[in-house]
Image: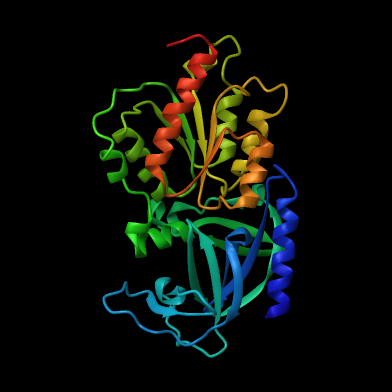
Amino acid sequence: MKGESEKMEDNKHGILLESGTNEIEVMKFTIGGNLFGINVAKVKEIMISAPVKPMPHAHPSVEGIFKPRDMVITVVDLPQYLGAESPKGEKDIFIITNFNKMYIAFRVHAVDRISRISWTDISKPDKTVSGGAESVATGIAQCEGELVTILDFERIVAEIAPETSIQISEVEQMGPRDRNDRPIWVAEDSALLSKMIENSLRKANYVNLRMFPNGQELWDALSVLPADHELEQDVALIITDIEMPQMDGHRLTKLVKESGSRFKEVPLVIFSSLISEEMRLKGKDLGADEQLTKPEIGHLVDVMDHLLEQFDRRHGRG
């Protein structure tokens, strides 16, 4: 397993050296004979499963905790969460992840390999088979001739531990706010998180929101805006996730901010669970105005206020 972990680290560093390529590296794993995938950028380590200490009153899918080296990590029984009836095995694998500023280990049956593909090769699952808006599948990928279900790990964690996800109470604590009808466009592929973001921004009195399920659809909508319009009447600020089918947030940022783009002056915020120091450097290189880590929705509202005020001052408004 050590060799596989080292390979994973090498691949992660390789993809971080490139900007806006619209590619993803997927670690494939199996549960009950079915093939699933996770973005390598979320993975810190893979290891043979270890004894777990149960925790009272935990979610049914939370096995408990274990302590590899000097860190206590929560273990999620992913087969149990997905309804795969199979006993735990000595050869099971823990995929140790880091996103939303948390370390979580997910039990799986086996790890396959890493595939590098374009986000255009990942499509949203059909609602008739995915459970619609409540699906834990964020996309279906074609990897080397195999169909791989990309799981929405943010949604899984939000369901198991709601207190770790976006909290509308952060906005409520800001108190009464003036109505703001500036057009805000948001690209977020997770149906659950998209609704949480929308509800929170509306609570902050940002009332003119346009939500997109991926960067491609947002970019397509930008591209057809009439050239003779004052741009901020159509879009005053863009918020984007990084991980999305069809077009990821980094590719979207590159297109919006590249030299010669008529959208370059539109403030753009990357709001993602993947904001590590390396990812922050990449986003800065692409031209993002701000980069924030989920689930800090109150911080996002503050940054939106600031960027719109800055934009107004630069253009002699307000």
Q: Position of residue 172 (x, y in %)?
A: 26, 39
The residue lying at 58 percent from left, 9 percent from top is 228
Q: Where is residue 78 in the image (x, y as percent from the top left)?
A: 46, 73
Q: Position of residue 235 (x, y in %)?
A: 50, 23
Would residue 214 be visible to someone looking at this image?
A: yes
Quadrant assignment, res 268: top right
Give the quarter of the figure containing the N terminus: bottom right
The residue lying at 41 percent from left, 48 percent from top is 193
The residue sitting at the bottom extreme is: 90
Residue 222 higher or lower than 273, as above or below: above
Residue 141 higher or lower than 258, as above or below: below
The residue lying at 42 percent from left, 27 percent from top is 305
The residue sitting at the front extreme is: 70
Give the quarter of the figure containing the C terminus: top left
The residue lying at 60 percent from left, 35 percent from top is 288
The image's colour scheme reads rainbow
| Closer to us: 104 or 160 | 104
Quadrant assignment, res 81: bottom left
Would residue 129 be visible to someone looking at this image?
A: no
> In the visual, does 150 lie left or right of 201?
right
Callout count: 0
Q: Where is residue 252 in the image (x, y as percent from the top left)?
A: 62, 37
